[in-house]
Every structure is written in C-alpha cells, then in structure tokens.
Image: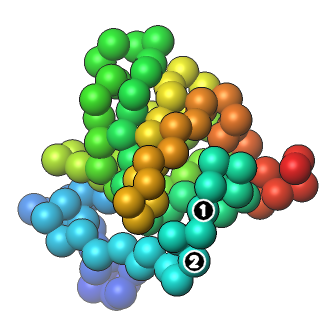
Amino acid sequence: MWRNSQKWKNRASRRPQRKGEALIGKLWIFRGLDRGRMTKKTLLMHELIGLKVKVIKSSHPGLIGIEGYVIDETKNTLTILGTKVWAIPKIVAEFEFEVGDKKIRIKGEELVGRPEMRLKKR
C-alpha cells in the first residue's frame, strides 16, 4: 500500500511534473541583502538564482529576447522563469542581469561551470 505514501503525493494528475512549472504566476524569490553591491567583475562570484535576466544575443535566434528570473543554474544552462520555463545554454548566449537599478551584460562563456567552481577560477 505504498501508493498512498508521501513519496507519491506530487504525482497526481493535473499537477505540473516539470521543474518550475508550479512557480509560474506565484513568483517569490529572495534577492539577498548585498545584491546592490554587485559589479560586472563580482557578478561571476555571486549567486545568480533570483536575478532578473534577459537574453541579449544568441547564436540561436529563437532565444533572443527571453526574459525572466533565474530559478536554477547548472554547469551549462540557466533555467529562466518568465511566461514559461526555459533552459538556456550558457555558451551560446549573452545575458543582461538586472541588479537593483544597474544592468550588467555578461557573455555566457564566462558563466560556464558550476557556481562553486567559478569562485576557484578567479
């Protein structure tokens, strides 16, 4: 009778099964206290999750103009939540992050790698 256990609670029909889909329309992201002190140089060493982002340039024309909040980051992708959820490859795009009233542009090639490993590079 393990079908009714907590493990299967989120597997009911009519519930979103993909990551981030449950968040659309209910966005709440902790932005932190030191977000206003970020610069282009220090953004690479900060947490990107929770920042507002827009794809400025891309080798794939379908990705240009996508904007929203970063909800997840892997070694090679940023997961962006806007009107829907996108997984954008870092290597093919240039991003514009909005930090307070500043806009910071960064090439995706500089972001490639795990967040904790980017600290060791610098």
Query: What percent of the width, then of the height, locates residue 89?
Result: 52, 31
Q: Is residue 11 left or right of residue 34?
A: left
Q: Which residue of the protein is positioned furthest toward the left in this rendering?
A: 14
Density class for disc 2 (Cα within 10 Å; few <14, some 14-19, many ≥20) is few
Q: Could you say which quadrant of the image residue 102 lies in?
A: bottom left
Q: Are marks 2 and 1 in contact (CB under 8 Å)?
A: yes
Provide the residue designation for mark 2. 34
At 79% from the left and 51% from the top, the residue drawn is 118
Q: Return the mark for residue 114.
A: none
Residue 79 can be seen in this image: no
Structural distance between the alpha carbons of marks 2 and 1: 7 Å
Instruction: Tell me the amino acid under the disc marked 1.
Output: Met
Q: Secondary structure at mark 2?
A: loop
Q: Is residue 100 left or right of residue 74?
A: left
Which quadrant is home to the N terminus?
Answer: bottom left
Provide the residue designation for mark 1. 38
Q: Secondary structure at mark 1?
A: loop
Instruction: Tell me the amino acid under the disc marked 2.
Output: Asp
Q: Is residue 99 left or right of residue 6?
A: right
Of the pair 78 and 107, the residue shown nearer to us = 107
Query: What percent of the width, then of the height, locates residue 34?
Result: 57, 77
At 51% from the left and 28% from the top, the residue drawn is 94
At 55% from the left and 52% from the top, the residue drawn is 73
